[in-house]
Image (spheres, rainbow, N blue to C red):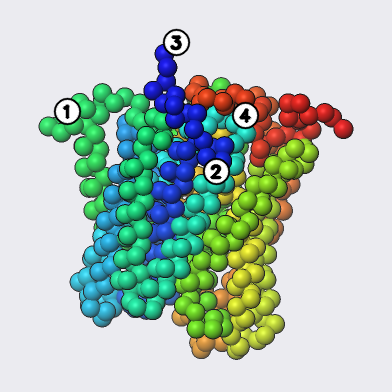
Amino acid sequence: MATSPYAAEEGRTILGHPRGLFVLFFAEMWERFSYYGMRALLILYLTKHWLYSDGDASIIYGAYTALVYITPVIGGYLADRYLGQRKAVLFGAVLLTLGHFFMAFEGNGSGHQNDPALNIFWLALAFIIVGSGFLKANISVIVGQLYPRTDVRRDGAYTIFYMGINLGAFIGTLVAGYLGETYGWGYGFGAAGFGMLLGLLVFMWGKPLLMGRGEPRDPARLRQPVMGLKFEWLLYLVGVLAVFVVWALIQYQELVGSLLGIAGGLLVAYVLYTAVAKLDREDRDRIFAAMLLIVGSILFWALFEQAGSSINLFTDRYVDRGGVPASVFQSINPAYIIIFAPVFAWLWTALGRRGLEPSAPAKFGFALMQLGAGFLVLVAGANAVGVEVPTPVLFIFLLYLLHTTGELCLSPVGLSAMNRLAPAHMASLIMGTWFFASATGNFAAGLISAATGSEHGTGEGAAKEVVLGVYSQIGWISVAVGVGVLVISPLVKRLMHLDTLKDADHAMAGETQLAEPIAPGTRTQGELKPGEARS
């Protein structure tokens, strides 16, 4: 029997997990440092430096974040078919590093109508958008490839990975937000660029620890010449050309919305056609379950992503911050994630051992209910002290607390569910579809944020009332939809066919001893671990 070239590495773990998980943890941590550090400043940068109105700035913000989440569909496809996930992540990291450094060019500060440096700003956004397309879905897929589909460690691995995302987001928003608002926008964006560079270096250094996961399916194909170039380099050239296409596209936000609708319809049709025409009944049902979860996540992200836009502006204008820069408050959500992610990981495992763990669809329902409650708490707090009085910062902390507990019920659970429910050959496509739902939600978030803009009210008090009115409406809608999702969750759970889920064809040393028939997060009620006695 041939020995795996990675046999020595397969026996080495950290906290019971493959060492490659922590390479991905730190690479993604620094990438998220850069992304969220820049995101914390973006809406403020658009309104204060480029002098866009709240409505226009919100639409730009929504189009940008939507494209950041839609491009992983393309990046995931190219990785699945040709590049492999590792090469796609590496190329994406290079583009992201360039984009974040371009953000540091501020121009002359005369506003968007008179400053030619605005073109550099659009180019920076384009590099970040396309770079995210190659990196975002694929690095999550490599996490899943380190484990069999039913490994007991999978949910824990995604929770650890998700904590890396939020550790980077926490540090990035504090550092870039403080530097950008205190010393100048270029300092904040420059710090984000250095963070991305560190992420790139970590990923390059850690290649041996990934044990060959994420490599191209047909390396010989990549070496074949096409039009005088190796096919691999031709793919990279297509990526660079895509930067300039996006540079033009991001300047026409309404077109982005139209294309998003068309592309979304085509993507859903392709996934469903593939499920119906090429999969057996159980895998087809799992794809249907995944698609239902994906649809439910759209509303969640449309409301959750108010954080970087309208909530950021609300904090800047209407909250008693005690002199702390508004962008720094973007660090509250990732701080809560760092605190509560281990608690939720323990909770799901503990409930699963007792047959009491909610199903993934039920967790989605709870997430939407908590999300809506966060907006309603902020509205109640602002009205309690009076619209003319700055809202106590306590209610911002309470809003983010409820949004965070909702996020922990949806996002890591959703990532794990997408990778588990998808057949191996559709893994990146389904993960890309998950991010496409985030794109749709983010564009909708820009439209909602635009509805809260100060131009809709005369005077500070009236403008604040407009914001609170929108928050009250979306809060109640989210709670109602969450209740509906909870009601239909047993039907969706049946489509997941958890009792017949099988591993992929690769295994690492020791995995057969650690794997369970049903992993945490998906155990059906009443099932037992090996060796457990019924009470």
Q: Earlier in the sequence, mark 4 or mark 2?
A: 2
Q: Residues within 10 Å of mark 3 (few under 14, many from 20)?
A: few
The residue labelled by disc 3 is 1
Query: Where is residue 513 shown, x and y percent of the image?
Result: 62, 25
Query: Where is residue 445 shown, x and y percent of the image?
Result: 50, 62
Q: Using the image, determine if residue 386 lies above or below residue 234.
A: below
Which is more foreground, mark 4 or mark 2?
4
Q: Residues within 10 Å of mark 4 (few under 14, many from 20)?
A: few
Q: Using the image, determine if residue 10 lies above or below residue 117.
A: above
The residue labelled by disc 1 is 225
Q: How many marks?
A: 4
Q: Nearer the viewer, residue 308 or 153?
A: 153
Q: Which amino acid type corresponds to the residue marked 2 in the rendered image?
A: Tyr
Which is more foreground, mark 3 or mark 2?
3
Marks 4/2: CA distance? Answer: 16 Å
Looking at the image, do the residues carrying marks 4 and 2 touch, with CB atoms under 8 Å apart? no
Q: Secondary structure at mark 3?
A: loop
Q: Residues within 10 Å of mark 2 (few under 14, many from 20)?
A: many
Q: Earlier in the sequence, mark 3 or mark 2?
A: 3
Per the rendering, the mark at residue 158 is 2
Q: Is residue 141 visible?
A: no
Q: Nearer the viewer, residue 100 or 168?
A: 168
Per the rendering, the mark at residue 448 is none
Q: Secondary structure at mark 4?
A: helix
Q: Secondary structure at mark 1?
A: strand
Marks 3/1: CA distance? Answer: 36 Å
Q: Which amino acid type corresponds to the residue marked 4 in the rendered image?
A: Leu
Q: Which amino acid type corresponds to the residue marked 1 in the rendered image?
A: Pro
The residue labelled by disc 4 is 514
Which is more foreground, mark 2 or mark 1?
2
Query: Where is residue 282 shown, x and y percent of the image?
Result: 61, 25
